[in-house]
Image (cartoon, grey):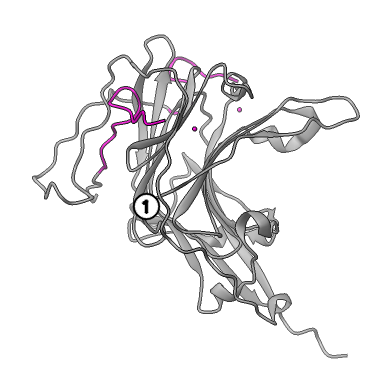
Amino acid sequence: MKTKFILPIIALGLFAACSDDSSSTGPDANSTTESSSSVEPESSDAVDPESSESAKPEPSAAEETVPQEPIRKEIENTIPNNVATEVEDFADYLYYGAELSGTDQFTYGRFEARMKMVSISGSVSSMFLYYDPSYMLKKQPWNEIDIEVLGTNPGSWQSNLITREADTSSFENPKITSEYKTGFGFNSTEDFHLFAFVWTPEYISWEIDSVEIRRDVLGMEKGQVEFMTKQQTLRFNLWASKHSGWTGKFTGAELADGPVAQEIDYVRVYSYDTETKTFTKAWQDDFDGDALDTKHWSKGDWLMENVKLSKDNVVVEDGKCKLLMSRKKKEEPAAD
């Protein structure tokens, strides 16, 4: 098994957080994973300290000291916006995306993935937690925690919470969202970076390369942290939206030379103990081999606006899980 090198984790409150400034509960580990281990520093051979892939310790399991104040940290975005390329043959193709769907159910935890993202006009390249019955609209509440790189710009990303109260009447309650966009300071499609979010009863936070960019806490105006109580699954997907004002206009032209791929180097999951306020590593997937670990993952196969999610577009190879967006020429109709 190859060695995975981990970027430093400094922004949970277990560590020095940046403070410049935006499905039934499981037993104590709050996860259905079968085993977990105490979070201990990993040993490794000496590496270049200047390297972005230097080996780093995992977070301490000491009690949290996260200040319960909201954070919104802005990072300059110097990457130019994507520009859609008009095509005349859009309707001649079928378009496919991909979803890596987690099978474990979580209530609270820390979730990390080292990824290289996709940003072409119209695309959504994501990592998120999702209460599976949310789509049932009136009958169920909605719980969702998002990280999204959008097709408008590879140099920025969106963090978001989505909540909605269940409504059994003849009306549908509206979703409550809290989108926040910030720059990366780099192009997210050119190299791998560590994405993470933390979900506890007291706060939800988002990080990029171990820098906390946003933290929402109890008592904020929209009340989303306190509403986020449903068990959720961890998911990743790549798809194309019909909402051009949000993601840019999807034309399919960027797929003319072949698929584009969101690449996931590894996923690491920590459970959260609400009594001790500590995190414990539950499991890690390095995507070694040539197939998904079905203990933790399945594949999506439904329609996502401009694309059909295809199980064939979730590929494990070269020590990575690749989510592909592709197109296929429609077959010519049979002659009379």
> Which quadrant would residue 8 be assigned to in this image?
top left
Residue found farthest to the bottom: 336
The percent position of residue 197, horizontal first and vertical second, equals 44, 34
Q: Quadrant of residue 109?
A: top left
- Give the percent coordinates (x, y) of residue 180: 54, 40
Question: Is 147 situated above or below 314?
Answer: above
Which residue corresponds to mark 1?
185
Q: Which one is in front, 168 or 24?
A: 168
Tell whether 133 sits left or right of 311: right
Foreground residue among 19 and 295? 19
Q: Is residue 196 visible?
A: yes
Q: Which residues are magenta?
A: 6-33
Q: Residue at x 29, y 34 (%)?
A: 9
Which residue is at a point 34% across and 37% down the rendered structure image?
A: 211
* Residue 58, position as x, y percentages in the image: 25, 32
Residue 35 on the magenta segment? no
Mark 1 burial class by Cα count in 10 Å: few <14, some 14-19, many 20+: few
Left or right of residue 197: residue 37: left
Q: Amino acid at mark 1?
A: Gly
Q: Image quadrant for the C terminus? A: bottom right
- Which residue lies at the image location 35% right of the left edge and 22% below the top edge? 279
Q: Secondary structure at mark 1?
A: loop
Q: Farthest residue in the top direction?
A: 275
Residue 310 visible in the current orientation = no
Q: Is residue 229 depicted above or below 144 in this figure?
A: above
The majority secondary structure of the magenta stretch comes to loop
